[in-house]
Amino acid sequence: MIKKIVSKNFDIKDSHILKIAKENGRYSSLEKLFSLSPQEAVEIVDKSGLRGKGGGGAPTGAKWKLIPTNGDKPTYLIVNADESEPGTFKDRQILEFDPHLLIEGIICSSYAIKSNHAYIYIRGEYVFWAKRLQTAIDEAYEAGILGESVLGHDYKLDVTLHRGAGAYICGEKSALVESLEGKRGHPRLKPKQKEPEWFFDYPSVVNNVETISSVPYIIKEGFEAYRAFGTEKNPGTMLFGLSGHIQNPGVYELEFGTNMLEFINKIGGGVKDGKKLKALIPGGSSCHVLKADELEGITLDYESLRAHGSSLGTGGMIVMDETVSMPHVVKNLFEFYHHESCGQCTPCREGVSWSDKLMGKILDGQGTKKDLDTLLSLSFLLNGKTICVFAPSVAYIIDSYIGKFKDEFYSLVK
Amino acid sequence: MSFKFNKENEEKFQKLLRRYPKIDSLMLPCLWMIQHQEGWISPETMEYLAEKLNKSPMDVYSVASFYTMFHLKPVGKYNIQVCKTLSCMLRGSEDIKKHIEKRLKIKAGESTQDMKFTITEVECLGSCGTAPCVCINDDYIQNTTPQMIDEILDGLNRWSN
């Protein structure tokens, strides 16, 4: 069930140190990489079917192909290490245990999109991980792996670590780029046709840490090797997180298509203290919640979860046992979204704080049936009327929790 | 205006200038440098930064006030940040918060009179697998128990006396 590609070196002592990392295969994909042309590298990644692992699941190769190839402007690779979706803590495992894998992935990806400078945008709270990554970057510069000439090849690459400062929304790629430009993290309007992200006036690619860390394996072993894992539409593996009421919380790398319940019970050890499972959020708090009896037959891939009315998201699962009160969970999530709404779009700014206030009123015992109706109607206001997908996530929370645990909510109101 | 980057930060600033296509990108790194130097970001330091980056002080304020980790007023020497989001809540973050409040005799959002401790409730710290999580200044405390909090607070009290 467990398949270690990205997490291969996680259990090796001191694997974050360059010497140990190299002994364990890091940077071994570069020889193959430099025998390829950038276009060939893009093709290999495209054929591998690698999908973005930050939550959206967009095909990586297609994203890279949006970069103009005439080369008259510098291009940039921007790595999204702004991991802040509740329930998600996978990228930090890579930063902690194998930062050189990320740097190797950055070299492969930058070379493919002909970029000479990559930025890693790391969330502000990850001070320990930023230090560890910076140490690894410094080591790589010193060893000639980064800098004017990468390992003696005619290719220059700089990597700059950029710290965020505590804003969930900066994990949204266009908000991240805004933030990197020194502005408030406000998501940008989406273009009509697919375009690269624009960092100032320069075409750029924004990819998640885990996505970039999957690239070296694909370059070295070839796209067929990667496609041997997972399913037809979801090739490869992903780091899945388990948190909440679970016996063995943690991050585990699995092939796509693994049975969810088997994973939770066999590897996760089942619900903590032998209690009964009540509900589960499959991939970060922005997904539709699933009731225990809905989990039968779900496999961990984008299509299966969509077919079951939720989404794979970041793969960070939050397990809730029978003692959990759903209205309290919803209030907790509303507080999160209320705090993190960037305030740019009125439906989100007003709608999320309104939802939070209504839920507070209901939990205080002051709520009426009409308040719940208002809350349900806010879902309509929030869904599809804003620039980014933040507000729709709140709509999903309203719909799925109240829809699936109706009695709990209606028993609280007059 | 009396605030100025110290030598170390000025050197860092000059180095960073060469690493971005436009000076605008230095906004967040500079705000971090100010906060490290001063402990918080005062209106005076924002004016200094505005001049340095060719921005208006309002531009700087607009950015500094957007990001929750920038302190626009002084905080205690030890900023105790308790994660309150779902995975931590399910693992007992509320009890941890209450325990810290009881020990320090202040509520979340407040500082002790000697400005030694501040308690802040924060949203997801990305430590869901090792919940509940508390972050004291830059350091994560994971799988936190009340006993761990006692040991750390006792240690910090001894250390700074």
Image (cartoon, rainbow, N blue to C red):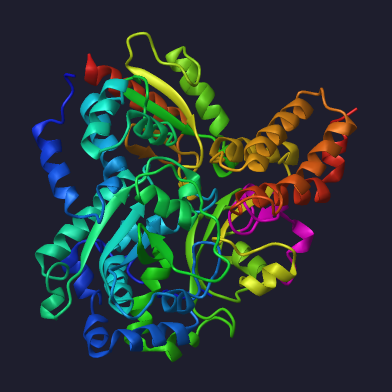
Res A326 quadrant in image:
top right
| x and y percentages locating residue A165 in the rendered image | 38, 40
Instruction: Identify the residue shown where x is 19% and y is 68%.
Output: A20
Res A139 quadrant in image:
bottom left
| x and y percentages locating residue A168 in the rendered image | 49, 45
How many dots with numbers?
0
Instruction: Identify the residue shown where x is 32% and y is 80%.
Output: A70
| Image-based side of B111 in relation to B128, left or right | left
Q: Which residues are magenta?
A: A270-298
| Image-based side of A15 in relation to B128, left or right | left
Q: Quadrant of the C terminus of chain A?
A: top right
Q: Quick check: A120 above or below A320?
A: below
Q: Quick check: B136 above or below B126?
A: above
Instruction: Identify the residue shown where x is 51% and y is 26%.
Output: B97
Of residue A113 and residue A57, the one placed in the foreground of this image is A113
| x and y percentages locating residue B84 in the rendered image | 54, 35
Question: From where the camera sits, is residue A222 visible?
Answer: yes
| x and y percentages locating residue B42 in the rendered image | 31, 22
Of residue A45 and residue A198, the one placed in the foreground of this image is A198
Instruction: Identify the residue shown where x is 74% and y is 37%.
Output: A327
Instruction: Indicate whether residue B57 is drawn in magenta.
Output: no
Instruction: Indicate whether residue A273 is drawn in magenta.
Output: yes
Q: Quadrant of the N terminus of chain A?
A: bottom right
Question: From where the camera sits, is residue A7 visible?
Answer: no
Q: Quick check: A168 above or below A301?
A: above
Of residue A45 and residue A22, the one placed in the foreground of this image is A45
